[in-house]
Image (cartoon, grey):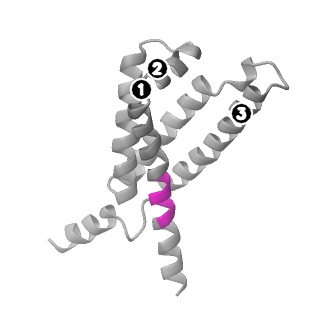
Amino acid sequence: MPKTFENLCITSGRILLGLYFIFPGIMKITGYEGTVQYMADHGMVFIPFFLIFTVTLQVGGGVILAVGFQTKAIAFILAGLTLVISLVMHDFWTMPSGELQTAHETQNFIKNMAIMAGLLAVAGLGGGPWSLDHKRQGQAGTT
């Protein structure tokens, strides 16, 4: 029972972290103009490049993470992406204190640091026994 619970926690956590990237990546595509404007409002340069790059990492990386393929590497890459997005797009320290938008960006920044912590844990520990990585290791050991 305890092993099953651990495996369920690892797997569900990995899948939820993957979904955290997949859905916002898709929303960046469906809300392209709004995303471009949001990025411009934050002083981003080369917006088309960075938007395509981010969407690719979020959707592709989210799927890869959810299924547990190359889990440690993709979790580390997504942690880096999360840090960069947090520093550039949720720069609450540049905003006037006491305003609603400042509180909103502060909350997003702190939330993203927690997401990054989860990703770093996955990067260190791997995807668990119910992942493609584990399945591939088992097959490599039998050939």
Q: Circle 2 sits in a helix, a strand or a loop, which is it?
A: helix
Residue 123, how many percent across, how many down?
47, 51
Foreground mark, 1 or 3, reads 1
Label 1 environment density (alpha carbons within 10 Å; few <14, some 14–19, many ≥20): some
| Separation of marks 2 and 3 at Cα, in angstroms | 19 Å
17 lies above or below 134: above
| Separation of marks 1 and 3 at Cα, in angstroms | 21 Å
Between 64 and 75, which is closer to the camera in this rendering? 64
- Looking at the rendered structure, the kind of residue marked 2 is Val
| Separation of marks 1 and 2 at Cα, in angstroms | 6 Å
Q: Which residues are magenta?
A: 12-17
Please name the residue that numbered disc 3 is placed on: 104
- Looking at the rendered structure, the kind of residue marked 3 is His
Which residue shows up at 83% across the image and 23% down it?
Answer: 97
Please name the residue that numbered disc 1 is placed on: 32
- Looking at the rendered structure, the kind of residue marked 1 is Tyr
Which residue shows up at 67% across the image and 24% down it?
Answer: 91
Q: Which mark is residue 36?
A: 2
Q: Which mark is residue 133?
A: none
